[in-house]
Image: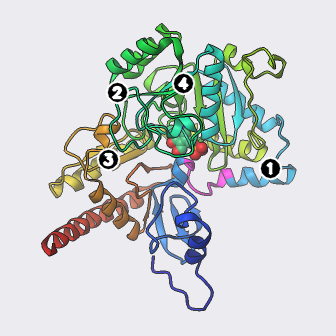
Amino acid sequence: MHETSTTKDPTPRERSLAVFPAGSNGEFNLPADAAMVIDRGLGCELWDAAGRHYYDFSMGWGSVLVGHAHPRVVEAVLRRAPLGSNFAYVTGESLALAEEIVRLSPAADQVRFCASGTEATMYCLRLARAFTRRPKVLKFEGAYHGANAAGVTSLFPTAAANYPHADPTSAGIEGQAGDDILVAPFNDLETTRRILAQHAGELAAVIAEPLQRCVPPEPGFLEGLRAATREHGVLLVFDEVVTGFRLAYGGAQEYYGVVPDLVAYGKALGGGYPIGAFGGRHDIMQLVREDRLGDGQYVWTASTLGGNPISATASRAALEVLSLPGTYERLHAMGNDLRQSLRRTLADRSIDAQVIGDGPLAQVVFSKEPVRDYRTSQRGDKSLARRVMLGLFERGIFLNPMGTKLYLSLAHDRAACDALIDRFGEALDAARHDAKTSFAAS
Ligand SMILES: Cc1ncc(COP(=O)(O)O)c(C=O)c1O
């Protein structure tokens, strides 16, 4: 954060601010004086170009669940790299990976690879529309499914529209938001059922993050969704880009015990390398066969780098690590400990907040009210949240300062979690002190 230029040459931060909007290639923007350029990472730590050390609680937005530069992943990639990096066709690596996904994923009789979670959910919805010959999909307010139309629609609505009316959130999205995308509140089965019943004839799919952002499904919600979609002949799509391989080896399907018709994967699947995968019932997946071209239901899928052997090799190495005994007990124990410690730190200071999440995921919402959906997640003190998150950043904790999830990995240990908790306490005290002094001055 205290990067200085000793010569006339611009610093990495200055160069980054010049070529990237807001000095960022990602979803979150830092204030200009906090923008940084990362040099390297190892385990749960990273260092920036100015030599500063951070504990990483973003972990490549959760893509590096095994930890940065895990030796087994590095060794596998180095072994594979001299043999060619992309053929845009099946290799032994992508074949073995596909077999493993079909084995572990209850929903996936067959799969195809792509290069990101955004593509994976897009293909699931395209398949659903083609299979059912219906135009619309229903998503849950505040859910993210990647940068595609359904992913960003009603992602951060600023005004409370009436369900199922959608908010565009991003300009420039094809079609008019709301035409083809209906929106329901997460964890509200009654409203969801009502919308389903009213629109069943035009609804192809309901897409859900089984753990929406960091908000767990209430008991019976996913089961109710499964039953209601089945009743109306609407396909259920699970976006397991975050939950896949993270809540359990078999993802949310195994963890919550509900099986959708189609499933999308990404992030942790790649061990930090680019990959996405989508899969589902055999009869649905058959729509992508080229010999169906022209029959009105054929679905185009293509991804030049999808399933490339480097990503597939990294993925297989990561899955080997994740499938070792004790992985999920450890990830859940660490997540529980972290959430408890965050709660204690807040309670010691009598600060009203909710600490939500499941497995190796946590989020603090500075609100008195329990969080069960997007709207309750937005009722908190967002300015305090922002100050605390930036305070953590200043104190050497790398995270998304939009106040979203903290991602743990297999590489996190007691030292990293203790550092987070100590600095969280300091950042809370500093943020409250700043708030008091600015109030006194006004
Ligand atoms: C639940 C969920 N789905 C899809 C995506 C999109 O994945 P990608 O960024 O690989 O396109 C994300 C990314 O954060 C996500 O959290």
Mark 1 neighbour density, 10 Å: few (under 14) some (14–19) many (20 or more): some
> Which label's residue is closer to the chain start, 4 or 3?
4
Disc 1 secondary structure class: helix
* Residue nearer the viewer, 442 or 117: 442
> Which label's residue is closer to the chain start, 1 or 4?
1
Q: Quadrant of the N terminus?
A: bottom left
Q: Quadrant of the C terminus?
A: bottom left
> Which label's residue is closer to the chain start, 2 or 4?
2
Between circles 4 and 3, the one closer to the viewer is 4
> Which label's residue is closer to the chain start, 1 or 2?
1
User: x, y (%) of residue 28?
Assistant: 48, 57
Q: Tell me whether circle 2 and circle 4 mark residues in contact (CB < 8 Å).
A: no
**Chain part drawn in magenta:** 63-73
Q: Is 418 drawn above or below residue 235 in the view shown? A: below
User: Could you tell me how far apart the alpha carbons at marks 3 and 1 are, in whole angstroms?
Assistant: 39 Å
> Which label's residue is closer to the chain start, 3 or 1?
1
Between circles 1 and 2, the one closer to the viewer is 2
* Residue nearer the viewer, 349 or 373: 373
